[in-house]
Amino acid sequence: SEKLKVSDFDLSMVNEFDHYLKQTPWNNKGDRMKLTSINKHHSRLKAVLFAAFKEGHLHRNPYQEFKLSFPHAKREYLSKEEVNRLRSLDLMGNKTLDIARDLFLFSCYTGLRFMDAQDLTVRSLQKINGADYLRIDQGKTDDRIEIPILKPAAKIIDKYDDSFERKQGKLLPLLSNQKTNKYLKFLAELAEITKPLTHHVARHT
């Protein structure tokens, strides 16, 4: 087989590699690779070429000019009317269901991922120019962000002032993602929401 030097790689060669991945069957049935698999192969080569560029073996990383394409992901979200139905449910004093609902609604109002919301502490509350904000370092991206606290989110925060978690410095009640999603499925049935309801839906609502 022909050997290639790292220094030989340019944009045209990356384009040829992309064409090869898209056109070559990967099994005996003749199935072609899905876009996510193609991107994984590109990511591996991109990492090698980036290292070569840093070490001076390449004058330019060809991936600076090559754009990966990604499949369009359908993001489920709730309508305002569906959120109102969920919020107005009479849960007959069921505290666990109430907590699961509050965790979901809180992320609707803040856009926070489940773990980022669970990681919030009293110190996350900040006054910026006289207004209440949440200041956090996102676990997934390590980006520092500041989120204005809307009135419905503030009500949820105030609701748990006397909770065990608040006394430990946590802002919200603690519940596993798995259990939260389990209870959200039940809440969706009560609210007559036919969409598959998970906590992740809150970020897109």
Image: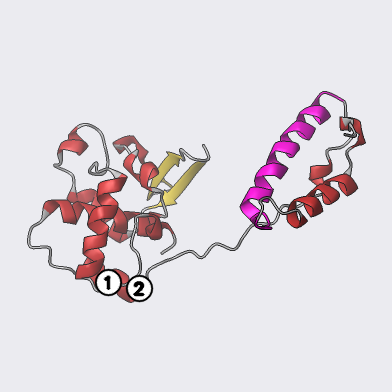
Q: Quadrant of residue 72?
A: bottom right
Q: Quadrant of residue 9?
A: top right
Instruction: Using the image as rendered, state which of residue 130 and residue 184 is in the foreground.
Output: 184
The residue at the far front in this view is 28
**Residue 42 position within the rendered picture, expressed as x and y whole percent measured from the top left:** 72, 44
Q: Quadrant of the N terminus?
A: top right
34 within the magenta span: yes
Residue where numbered disc 1 is placed: 84
Q: Residue at x 80, y 51 (%)?
A: 20
Label annotation for residue 139:
none
Q: Amino acid at mark 2?
A: Lys
The residue at the far left in this view is 92
Residue where numbered disc 2 is placed: 80
107 within the magenta span: no
Say few, some or many: other residues with alpha carbon within 10 Å of mark 1 (under 14 / 14 to 19 / 20 or more). Answer: few
Characterize the magenta stretch by its predominant secondary structure: helix
Instruction: Using the image as rendered, state which of residue 203 and residue 159 is in the foreground.
Output: 203
**Residue 132 position within the rendered picture, expressed as x and y whole percent measured from the top left:** 36, 49
**Residue 158 position within the rendered picture, expressed as x and y whole percent measured from the top left:** 21, 50
Which secondary structure, mark 2?
Answer: helix
Instruction: Please state if 52 lies on the left or on the right of 154 as rendered.
Output: right
The residues tagged by marks 1 and 2 sit, at their Cα atoms, a distance apart of: 6 Å
Instruction: Using the image as rendered, state which of residue 17 and residue 122 is in the foreground.
Output: 17
Q: What span is in magenta?
A: 29-56
Q: Does 75 sit above or below residue 54?
A: below
